[in-house]
């Protein structure tokens, strides 16, 4: 039996980059909670993720989901030195803006705003795109994230020199690389497996 | 913990144990370990289900080569060589040449962002390769879209995979595989550039005479 892709007829689907709490709806059928085995729960890593259609869809291949989630959390949440959380989120938001993932950009622009207290600058990144002037340090971080996001990648020793010039040490540079690289993973899943839905009023 | 000697990112970057880059990677030990576990979940799975290893490596060779990084693309081509039973390498190599372009591009949902729409190649495999590719043909088209123009997403693209005989679970695995490679390839390229700068700096130290006072 061939499954059918799920389609929606949303009147007010999000069509601009925003920091609002928009939602996401899957184009393929997620697992039901009653279908979950121990291996699925292990892949989800947190029981609360069983409420998310995105994670319940990815749970269909639980081993890669579990490894992906643990990679994600260490890149973004590990507080041990390196790039400040705000700027890891900035890189995620810039990468998402460059690839065109409205949903991913909304989540990580919010985080970047929360941690940096520069919500207006973050909004200008969303409104005007990755060429916007956000000051020297943020411009360098955004440019490096965008260069790495191009296919084939345009990232090289020139970007490393710019990041050093902006004051990043080697661990911070590696954090920037991994944050942008990780969102090249996340953007492709979020964009291709479902669509953003309007913020709940 | 994964066996460090088998870490694919280390292998592709050329990370030397005990080097400055090794120390940097150890600063995010869980990410390092799970990037490797992600590779293993996709390319050495406990249960490959209905997505054959040969198919996984054929897609990986295609995706890696579209990123035009010789070391990474050689690695996946060689892996495909170990699993290829159907003479796929030649067909995939031809498809790679057919699919080369520069991204990201594509279209936004109709609205204010339409001004940023950027058209580009909408790759489809060569009909002459239809027979040798079989159900992989639909995946190559999907992988190319994921690599270069993910903002062109639509449920119709998933329906094409379903129609080609892939299950919903297969599509999750295939999507993870292509998206993971987009990550792995960029980590390798980024860390390799960092390693190059680190090595030049250390060579500079070794060859430039610095007085002990100045160095302190």
Image: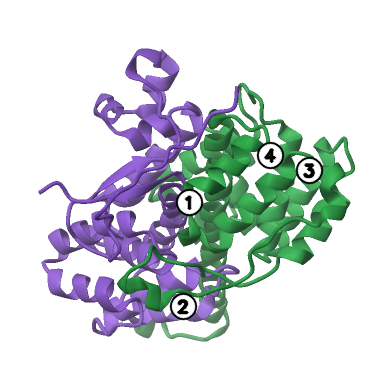
Closer to us: A115 or B13: A115
Element class at badge 2? helix
Q: Residues within 10 Å of mark 1 (few under 14, many from 20)?
A: some
Chain shown green: that is: B
Seen at 80% across and 47% down, the residue is B78
The disc label shown at residue A139, or none: none
Q: Which residue is mark 4?
A: B56
- As drawn, the chain in purple is A
Residue A152 point in image, percent of width and height: 60, 69
**Looking at the rendering, which quadrant does residue B74 occupy?**
bottom right
Q: Earlier in the sequence, mark 1 or mark 3?
A: 3
Count the marks.
Answer: 4
Name the quadrant containing residue A110.
Answer: bottom left
Note whether B187 is above or below A70 in the view shown. below
Q: Label 4: few (<14), some or many (≥20) within 10 Å?
A: many
Residue toward you, B178 or A140: B178
Q: Nearer the viewer, mark 4 or mark 3?
A: 4
Per the model, the C-alpha gap separating discs 4 and 2 is: 32 Å
Residue matched to label 1: B154
């Amino acid at each position: 039996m061939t499954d059918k892709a799920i389609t929606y007829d949303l009147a007010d689907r999000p069509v601009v980059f925003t920091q609002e709490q928009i939602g996401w709806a899957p184009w393929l059928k997620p697992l039901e909670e009653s279908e979950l085995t121990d291996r699925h729960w292990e892949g989800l890593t947190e029981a609360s993720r069983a409420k998310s259609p995105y994670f319940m869809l990815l749970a269909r291949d639980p081993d890669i989901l579990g490894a992906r989630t643990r990679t994600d959390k260490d890149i973004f949440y590990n507080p041990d030195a390196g790039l400040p959380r705000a700027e890891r989120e900035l890189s995620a938001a810039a990468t998402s803006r460059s690839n065109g993932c409205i949903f991913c950009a909304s989540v990580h622009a919010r985080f970047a705003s929360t941690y940096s207290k520069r919500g207006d600058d973050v909004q200008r990144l969303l409104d005007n795109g990755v060429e916007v002037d956000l000051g020297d340090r943020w411009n360098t971080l955004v440019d490096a994230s965008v260069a790495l996001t191009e296919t084939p990648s345009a990232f090289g020793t020139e970007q490393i020199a710019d990041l050093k010039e902006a004051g990043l040490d080697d661990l911070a540079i590696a954090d920037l690389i991994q944050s942008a690289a990780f969102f090249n993973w996340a953007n492709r899943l979020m964009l291709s497996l479902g669509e953003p839905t309007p913020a709940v009023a | 913990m994964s066996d460090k000697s088998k870490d694919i990112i280390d292998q592709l970057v050329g990370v030397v144990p005990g080097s400055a880059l090794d120390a940097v990677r150890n600063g995010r030990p869980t990410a390092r370990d799970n990037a490797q576990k992600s590779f293993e979940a996709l390319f050495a799975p406990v249960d490959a289900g209905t997505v054959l290893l040969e198919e996984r490596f054929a897609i990986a060779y295609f995706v890696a080569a579209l990123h035009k990084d010789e070391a990474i693309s050689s690695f996946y081509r060689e892996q495909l060589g170990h699993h290829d039973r159907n003479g796929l390498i030649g067909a995939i190599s031809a498809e790679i040449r057919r699919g080369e372009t520069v991204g990201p591009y594509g279209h936004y949902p109709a609205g204010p962002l339409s001004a940023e729409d950027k058209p580009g190649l909408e790759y489809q495999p060569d009909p002459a390769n239809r027979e040798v590719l079989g159900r992989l043909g639909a995946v190559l088209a999907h992988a190319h879209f994921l690599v270069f123009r993910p903002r062109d997403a639509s449920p119709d693209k998933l329906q094409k995979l379903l129609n080609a005989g892939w299950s919903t679970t297969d599509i999750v695995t295939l999507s993870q595989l292509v998206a993971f490679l987009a990550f792995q390839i960029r980590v390798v390229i980024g860390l390799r550039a960092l390693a190059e700068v680190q090595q030049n700096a250390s060579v500079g130290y070794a060859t430039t005479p610095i007085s002990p006072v100045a160095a302190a």
